[in-house]
Image (tube, rainbow, N blue to C red):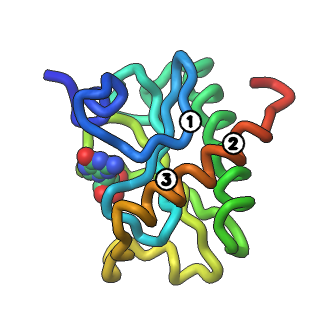
Amino acid sequence: MATIFSRIVAGEIPSYKIAEDDKYYAFLDINPVAPGHTLVIPKNEVDYIFDLNDEEYLGLQLFAKRVAEAIKQAIPCTRVGVAVMGLEVPHTHIHLIPINKEADMNFFKEKASLTQEEMAEIAAKISQNFGNTQSELY
Ligand code: 5GP
C-alpha cells in the first residue's frame, strides 16, 4: 500500500507544495514545529534514508539544500535546522525547520497553529524563492 507521502505526491491527498522535480518533492509539514517547517522526500518510496542508493541520497540532500535556502529567504530565522527521524511515516523525509535557538528544534513542544491561508501564504513564499536557488551539482 502506498505511504501517505506517496499519496501526497500523486495528488490524492492535498499538500502545501513547495517544490518538485522528477525525483523529489517538498511540502509543508501539516503539524509544524514552527512556521515554514518543511518536509523533503524522494518520490521513490524508501522507508529509511540510509537505504537510499548513493545517487538518490545525494540528490535528496542537494534538493533539501535548495529548499533550506528558500526557507531562509522566506522566513526570518537564524538558521534552518535539519532532522531525520521517520518513526511516524515509513517514507524517507528530511525535516527542515526555521530556528533561532537550539530549543526551537523541539518536536515535543506545542505545535504552531496556523490557518490554511497562512500555510498557503508561507508555501507560496518559499516556493517562489526556491525558483531562485540553484546548485552547482544538482
Ligand atoms: P516523523 O516520521 O519524522 O516522526 O514525522 C512525520 C511528520 O510527517 C510529522 O511531522 C507529521 O506532522 C507529518 N505528517 C504526517 N502526516 C502528514 C500529512 O498527511 N501531510 C503533511 N503535510 N504532513 C504529515
In space, the residues marked 1 and 2 are separated at their CA atoms by 7 Å
Residue 80 visible (yes or no): yes
Disc 2 secondary structure class: helix
The residue positioned farthest toward the left in the image shown: 1
The residue positioned farthest toward the front in the image shown: 117
* Labels 1 and 3: the sequence-earlier one: 1
Q: Is mark 2 within 8 Å of ligand 1?
A: no
Residue shown at 41%/70% (left/top)? 33
Q: Are marks 1 and 2 in contact (CB under 8 Å)?
A: yes
* Labels 1 and 2: the sequence-earlier one: 1
The residue beneath circle 3 is 38
Q: Vertically, is 66 above or below 46?
A: below
In space, the residues marked 1 and 3 are separated at their CA atoms by 11 Å
**Which of pointers 1 and 3 indicates the residue nearer the eye?**
1
From the top left corner, tell me how far across and down residue 7 is, in percent: 25, 28
The residue beneath circle 1 is 19
Quarter of the picture containing the C terminus is top right
Q: Is residue 14 left or right of residue 136?
A: left
Residue 87 visible (yes or no): no
In space, the residues marked 2 and 3 are separated at their CA atoms by 13 Å
Which amino acid, mark 2?
Phe
The residue beneath circle 2 is 130
Q: Vertically, is 44 above or below 64?
A: above
Residue shown at 71%/47% (left/top)? 129
Which amino acid, mark 1?
Ala
